[in-house]
Amino acid sequence: MAASTRRVTILDLAAAKRVRRPLTMVTAYDWPGARLVDAAGVDCALVGDSVAMVVAGRDSTLPATLEQMIYHGEIVARAVARALVVVDLPFPFQHLGARTAVEACARILKETGCQAVKLEGTAGQAGVIAAIVAAGIPVMGHVGLRPQAVHQLGGYRVQRDVDRLLEDARAAVDAGACAVVLECIPAEAARAITAAVAVPTIGIGAGPHCDGQVLVYHDLVGLSTGRVPKFVRAYADSKTAIADALARWRRDVEDRRFPGAAETLG
């Protein structure tokens, strides 16, 4: 069945939870990737600060800047017709006070054309979330493993403090978050949080009991370099296919088989 071409909204996310329809979200950083994500009927396109790692080759998300998020977010929002476009608020804006966070999120919303922002945070950021929502900007929360806090958390580790995870998720929802990403937490903790909050939970490394799932585009299509997390499933081997195509083209040029008659202008 073909996917609807109507824009997905935060109301659709809420409705999906009510009827137990699993939600889908994939990261997107550029025009061709965003077009493919949208054409596949994915509900949400996330312009993640993971762009610093998977596109720019950094070892964490921390170097991502507001300008980079706006640059990539504008491209993705322009490429997408159906999916809800969500852009990450980069470090450290959610820690600089509500006014600064609202100003940064307003820039993201106005300059990209996205429909929501995503904010990593604990219960301590509830006031910031509330201020952003009060400004008319939909917010998706993010609890569990928070890559922006990787040094504080001691690395990319499973987060097992169920009481703290539940407190953080509830605080985000009470502050007005329209959904919450649950990253790298035990499946039973994700089940408990999903049952406890009224908004959709979207898991990554959080087991099958969330209201939806998100993966990084490069991991999903097999373009990752280096270590791939256990919770990833690659649905294609694009890296091998691209490497093979490049090598074949190089050999054809070296052997003067490219360009051939079909590629030569008369």
Image (spheres, rainbow, N blue to C red):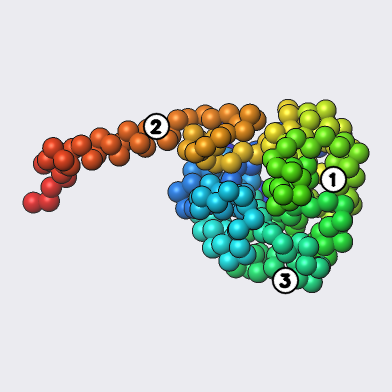
Element under disc 3: helix
Choose top left, top right, bottom left or bottom right for residue 161.
top right
Choose top left, top right, bottom left or bottom right for residue 126.
bottom right
**Identity of the residue drawn at 15% across and 44% down:** 259
Residue 134 seen from this side = no
**Identity of the residue drawn at 62% across and 33% down:** 229
User: Which of the two discs, 3 and 2, sits closer to the camera?
Assistant: 2
**Identity of the residue drawn at 39% across and 32% down:** 240
**Identity of the residue drawn at 63% across and 29% down:** 230
Label 2: which residue? Answer: 240
Front residue of this view, candidates 83 and 237: 237
Residue 23's x, y, as percent? Answer: 69, 37
The kind of residue on which mark 1 rests is Ala
Residue 169's x, y, as percent? Answer: 85, 45
Give the Cα distance between marks 3 and 2: 43 Å
Give the Cα distance between marks 1 and 2: 39 Å
Label 1: which residue? Answer: 169
Relative to 59, say whether 201 is above or below. Answer: above
The kind of residue on which mark 3 rests is Glu
Locate the N terminus by quadrant: top right
Q: Earlier in the sequence, mark 3 or mark 2?
A: 3
Q: Earlier in the sequence, mark 1 or mark 2?
A: 1
The kind of residue on which mark 2 rests is Thr
Element under disc 1: helix
User: Which of the two discs, 1 and 2, sits closer to the camera?
Assistant: 2
Element under disc 2: helix
Label 3: which residue? Answer: 103
Badge 1 vs badge 3, beta-carbon distance below 8 Å: no
Label 3 Cα neighbours within 10 Å, binned few <14 / some 14-19 / many ≥20: some
Badge 1 vs badge 2, beta-carbon distance below 8 Å: no
